[in-house]
């Protein structure tokens, strides 16, 4: 038998994201055989013109176990695709639209011009973009807009000497800060306050303070990392990934010219105006994912025509763009499979039932923080903010009365638990898709993000303690 050389080094292979997600799907399937099945009754509630089903907190009951079998494990993935269809559609439309705009040359010229103008003060791009992204999320709560932001800002960040983690963080961390410290987010604050029977969007002054502190600390953290990378590229956590990005952008002629032709200007201006129209539609007309997807397709088509592309060229550009986001779209469906398994096994309600019982046994001084931790744990299982609200808040609101926490504080605990961990857990589909778009491995992102997450968790806990002490209503 041939002996292995003694000096041979073995290298631990980073697990693929599909392997990580499939592990959690199998783990949840095993839990359906161990955790008792249980259900709450659901009752309809009208919010923002739509009907949602929320749990009746007094109706929990044990039911017969429905463990997920081997076939159910594999069926959970295509069912996950079905449930996440709207966000997956947006992901493909993002890729297709920017594939066309990129083919017109408008992006490459615009990036080159901006990089040249801001070469000495490029770091200022980060706080400006992050404040805007945070403000949008604070009012409309659509974190999925990160899927659109990243393809736009990634080439610019690399041209300015930063890295792909900086681009992803500018979008993800800013939208998360805004989503968490939401002022009028209808999907979290509005829904939770409706369920908790307190005035809609009340307590906005204190939430504004939370929003400012979270956004400010996040901007400082991202700028500190970006500054280190720009000064010394070896400090980047994704240096080898960015080398491939830079080679791709160089091959596409990203920095060869800084003066646009008339057609390139028309393509770029039309894309910017239509993108602004889409944001206004989300803000003013409550556009949903399907509206955004349609608008993105229109952006690609109009930009392609104005940019001088023939129909075949536009179609090929869409095709290439779809291919670039394929991994991100697939991640969403696989990630949703975790929740599908838990729903089929009827253990989600059991988890929240026992979480509520645990909070009742926590000392009164830290009940609000206990709620925050419970909501964070539950967010791993149900990453949808509105979905988490209709499951947890009908239980947490009356529970807060029993343990001496105001309902406003309980809602803030829900906001923090639901929001901050959205860009940590691999079960958050849109988050993993953004990382795939930027080609940032999840383990590298965790190395960057975990310190900020703990900083924000400490700040959030402090806000909860102060809110409880002052009796915030």
Image (tube, rainbow, N blue to C red):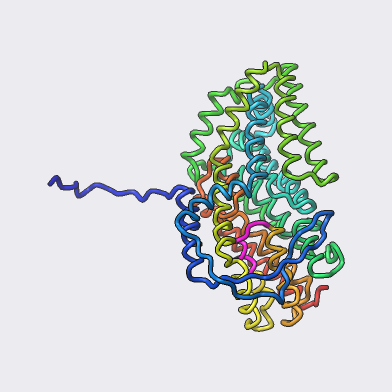
What residue is drawn where x is 56% and y is 52%? 335
The reply, left or right, for residue 170 in relation to residue 469 is: left
Determine if residue 45 is in view. yes
Q: Position of residue 378 (x, y in %)?
A: 61, 65
> Is the C terminus in the top left, top right, bottom left or bottom right quadrant?
bottom right
Residue 7, placed above or below residue 296: below
How far across and down, in percent of the image, does residue 191 sit? 78, 61
Residue 227 visible in rendering: no
Q: Which residue occupies the extreme left position in the image?
A: 1
Give whichever of 339, 369 is nearer the camera: 339
* Residue 227 sits above or below residue 451 on the image: above
Up/down of 38 relative to 302, above or below: below
The residue drawn where x is 68% and y is 63% is 416
Q: Which residues are magenta?
A: 373-384
* Residue 253 sits in quarter: top right
| Residue 284 forms part of the magenta stretch | no
x and y percentages locating residue 417 in the rendered image: 66, 64
């Amino acid at each position: 038998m041939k002996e292995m050389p003694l000096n041979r080094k073995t290298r631990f292979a980073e697990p693929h994201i599909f392997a990580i997600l499939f592990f959690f799907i199998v783990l949840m399937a095993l839990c359906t055989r161990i955790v008792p099945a249980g259900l709450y009754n659901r009752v309809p509630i009208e919010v923002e013109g739509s009907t949602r089903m929320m749990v009746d907190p007094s109706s929990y009951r044990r039911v017969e176990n429905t463990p997920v079998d081997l076939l159910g494990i594999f069926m959970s993935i295509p069912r996950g695709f079905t449930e996440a269809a709207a966000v997956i559609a947006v992901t493909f439309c993002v890729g297709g639209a920017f594939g066309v705009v990129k083919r017109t040359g408008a992006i490459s010229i615009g990036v080159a011009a901006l990089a040249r103008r801001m070469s000495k003060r490029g770091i200022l791009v980060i706080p400006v973009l992050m404040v805007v992204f945070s403000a949008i999320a604070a009012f409309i709560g659509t974190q999925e807009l990160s899927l659109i932001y990243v393809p736009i800002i990634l080439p610019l960040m690399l041209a300015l000497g930063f890295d792909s983690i900086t681009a992803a963080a500018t979008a993800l961390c800013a939208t998360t800060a805004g989503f968490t410290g939401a002022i009028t987010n209808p999907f979290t604050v509005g829904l939770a306050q409706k369920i908790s029977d307190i005035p809609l969007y009340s307590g906005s002054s204190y939430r504004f303070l939370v929003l400012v502190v979270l956004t400010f600390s996040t901007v400082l953290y991202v700028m500190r990392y970006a500054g280190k990378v720009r000064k010394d590229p070896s400090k980047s956590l994704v240096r080898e990934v960015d080398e491939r990005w830079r080679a791709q952008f160089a091959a596409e002629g990203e920095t060869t010219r800084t003066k646009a032709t008339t057609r390139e200007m028309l393509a770029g201006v039309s894309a910017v105006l239509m993108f602004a129209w889409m944001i206004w539609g989300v803000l003013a007309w409550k556009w949903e994912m399907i509206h955004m997807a349609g608008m993105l397709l229109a952006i690609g088509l109009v930009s392609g025509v104005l940019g001088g592309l023939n129909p075949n060229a536009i179609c090929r550009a869409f095709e290439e763009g779809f291919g670039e986001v394929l991994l991100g779209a697939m991640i969403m469906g696989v990630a949703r499979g975790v929740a599908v398994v838990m729903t089929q096994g009827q253990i989600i309600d059991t988890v929240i039932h026992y979480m509520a019982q645990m909070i009742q046994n926590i000392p009164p001084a830290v009940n609000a923080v206990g709620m925050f931790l419970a909501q964070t744990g539950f967010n791993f299982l149900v990453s949808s903010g509105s979905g988490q609200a209709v499951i947890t808040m009908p239980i947490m609101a009356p529970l807060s009365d029993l343990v001496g926490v105001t309902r406003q504080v309980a809602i803030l605990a829900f906001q923090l638990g639901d929001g901050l961990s959205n860009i940590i857990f691999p079960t958050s589909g849109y988050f993993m898709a953004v990382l795939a778009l930027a080609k940032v491995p999840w383990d590298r992102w965790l190395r960057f993000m975990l310190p900020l997450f703990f900083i924000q968790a400490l700040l959030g806990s402090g806000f909860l303690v102060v809110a409880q002490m002052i009796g915030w209503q």
